[in-house]
Image (tube, helix red, strand yellow):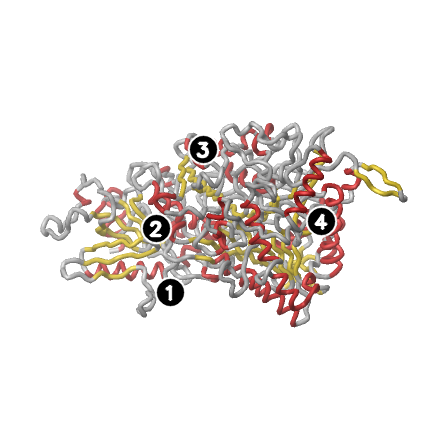
Amino acid sequence: MQGYLNHFLGNLDIVNSREVCRFLEVSRLSFSPEYGPKLKEDYVMVKHLAQISKDDDHRRCCTCNLLSWCNDNWQKVWAVLKPGFLAFLGDPFDTNLLDIIVFDMLPASDGNGGGRVLLAEEIKDHNPLRHAFKVTCGNRCISLRTKNSSKAKDWVAAINDAGLRPPEGWCHPHRFESFAPLRGLTDDGSMAQWFVDGQAAFEAISLAIENAKSEIFICGWWVCPELYLRRPFKDYASSRLDALLEAKAKEGVQIYILLYKEVALALKINSVYSKRKLLNIHENVKVLRFPDHFSTGVYLWSHHEKIVIVDNQICFIGGLDLCFGRYDTFEHKVNDYPPVIWPGKDYYNPRESEPNSWEDTLKDQLDRMKYPRMPWHDVHCALLGPPCRDVARHFVQRWNHAKRNKAPNEQAIPLLMPQHHMVIPHYMGSDGEEVEDVNGVEDQSLKRQDSFSSRASSQDIPLLLPQEEGQEEVSKLNEVDESHDHQMKLIRNVPFSFRKAKIKPLVSDMPMKAFVDDFDVVDGATHVGMKSLDKEWWETQERSSLVVPSIESGQVGPCVSCRCQVIRSVSQWSAGTSQTEQSIHKAYCALIEKAEHFIYIENQFFISGLSGDEIIHNRVLQAMYRRIMRAFNDNKCFRTIVVLPLLPGFQGGVDDAGAASVRAIMHWQYRTISRGLNSLLQNLYNVMGPKAHDYISFYGLRAHGKLCDGGPVVTSQIYVHSKIMIIDDCMALIGSANINDRSLLGSRDSEIGVIIEDKEVINSRMGGKLWKAGKFTLSLRLSLWAEHLGLRPGDIPQIQDPVIDSTYKDIWMATAKTNTMIYQDVFACIPNDLIHSRASLRQNVAYWKDRLGHTTIDLGVAPKKLECYQNGTLKDSDPLERLESVKGHLVSFPVEFMSQEDLRPVFNESEYYASPQVFH
């Protein structure tokens, strides 16, 4: 019998017949490893799809000719069940994805005491000839029919098993009630790498795009097609985003771009212009904008994720949009005259002026000889392996939701399928060459071009192949009942290693090479001696040829194995989910509560509430208050450092008539930090007095420079746009979410982030004692702190221990205080702790405008000569000489600025009539 079947199946003409494929329940999707192991497939009847052509007899329901109960609305389709989704095709040979249900979290109960909600359930019908079941997931419920009751039961059991069985099932929540499980618990290829500021991140993204082989996903709040990912821009014309995408699209790479469709009256990011520019690149570039405000009624909330995913193998998430104003280096220059780094409108300062149009991108918006650009500080990260595909799954959910709402009948816009969390890469190695098909057959139609190739050969694909000599292990990919464990065994035996990223780490290790060079392994853990923390680890850099060498130090982190969990904020409006997910919020609160020694936060906003606050609903502040109080009651050292923008990044002076939005955000932020019964500092002062500053302090960043030869000396805040939290040098949270209700509640803005827990540990110090710090997290903190404090390479060991007084008070707080005083002496810049009312602000602005004859909105121009007393005599000095004493960029956050004013909008301002939720 075995010989007969082998002979029978060796005849490809027979094997590729629809009858045999149906009998064996196989299709083109069956053995595509990127979508996971084969589960169940068969013909079913559906009625929710648009009419499918019935030219072929096989599409017709055989019972329709005999009975009238199967009306014309029901159609026969091929259903394919995979671990993460249920897909519908016209037939087993079809390449056109008719519909897909991507499995997502279900409610814990049905609300009626009926127990756990199921993904699939049988439908009882009064007609005994009808055998149906329904699949309910997200905001969709689809009814299906089968030929008999046993088939319906089989489908229900198989779907529920695929969706609900832990740990693979996607229908039950994971830690922090996230849709994604914790990755990296085993050697599964989960890796992470950090990037500080735009230069490092954009270079890495451009390299990944250049190496793309099949598909690119881009999701952004704002995307500028004319953005140069490498600078000087004149030397890297091919690095412009539209040029990069055009080159890849011409190679056959499928590119999917999901843009936030803004409310035009509120924002000037002009997504319709970006969409038109991107669509004109090539037919392989697909673009969707979402939401449709009129049909959805969503006016207040936005899509805020910043995602780039290449080939489902490497993804980039964090705070950086692919748009103007974000490119920056550790120097954070305020000038660029003549333009070398920032062309046209990329010389950006939203505090001074927001462009009304983005069409003429190379035309300056600001006078470079009069106004500084606003430097941009951000943090981004790359994820490789399973967490990358978790992010890709999120993108697929959002894309399909937008497709159904915005372009349901547009054939050029396809539905996408998520890849399984474990896949065999379709190309490997640094040379980027294609790998021979795992079956040893050169069949071009099998090479993926997108999520499900619409350009595959029309010829029938051999679905089952006779076993060839020497292919015993590989041929097992074609076994119908292949298990996940068996598949993992195969992955380890194929000629290439899955655990090695197909896109190699963007640097050979990390710029701080010697810092991680002298590892010794003790009991399976990695350690490094204190001798490494010297000048060499910062200065000696070995960069891969993939990365353009640059003069900065410590902007790119190590690419290391980590435990990673993807977290997000989504709901029905943003992703079509049935459950509102706020796993970012839950992760923030949980990680803060569990912190042992210190918390370091950089965020664009800091708006949160204490327990009982009925206006602000996120509880990051409550978690922080409880953790500090616990340390105070236990008489233990605990530090919390928060770095924020000095002012909101919107146009207009604090006192300007058109700057009500600026003042409104300031109100909610100060309400959180220091003013009123709901503020953190006031509650801490009530218990511990001034000692509160031993536990928590707030800071901003500032830069200065000369605009041009003979031009003025200016300053600007460095806009803190990063959204990160570092806990105990062991865990990091990086993403797109701000600390406010908009980003954290899940039902408002959509966000994406990742928790990274180190697996590779390094001998470090914490509270004066030996501490096992994480390679990823410690290197990120040291890079950030060195940049903010302006430390020289030999000084880095001084900040290794973040909580002792010699670091926290003598270096961190002292540097911020000194820099703040110098900037105040030279510029009298806004904001500062000396101005408490609008009256004093007006007086101060009037004085400096009269004295200088010119000023920026935030009083960022220095007088040509400073008056100072020397030996009792008043003398003039050069402001640059005074500014030489500034170290780094760190300054104190002005908690007393405008403390006597109510900054909320008043009745004659349009913001008064807007929902306050817009601002918090």
Where's residue 171, x and y in %? 38, 59
First of labels 1, 3 by sequence position: 1
Q: In this rendering, which labeled residue sits more in front, label 1 or label 3?
A: 3
Residues at marks 1 and 3, CA–CA distance in whole angstroms: 43 Å
Q: Secondary structure at mark 3?
A: helix
Front one among 306 and 95: 306
Q: Earlier in the sequence, mark 2 or mark 1?
A: 1
The span from disc 3 to disc 4 (Cα, nearest Å) is 40 Å
Q: Are marks 1 and 4 in contact (CB under 8 Å)?
A: no
What percent of the width, then of the height, locates residue 337?
66, 29
Q: What residue is disc 3 on?
A: 273
Q: Amino acid at mark 3?
A: Tyr
Camera-nearest label, 2 or 1:
1
Q: Quadrant of residue 436?
A: top left
Where 641 sits versus 236, above or below? below
Going from the N terminus, do you reach mark 1 or mark 4 first? 1
Q: Quadrant of residue 668?
A: bottom right
- Would you say residue 856 is visible in this rendering? yes
Question: Which residue is tagged 2?
Answer: 478
- Which residue is at 74% across, 61% downward? 805
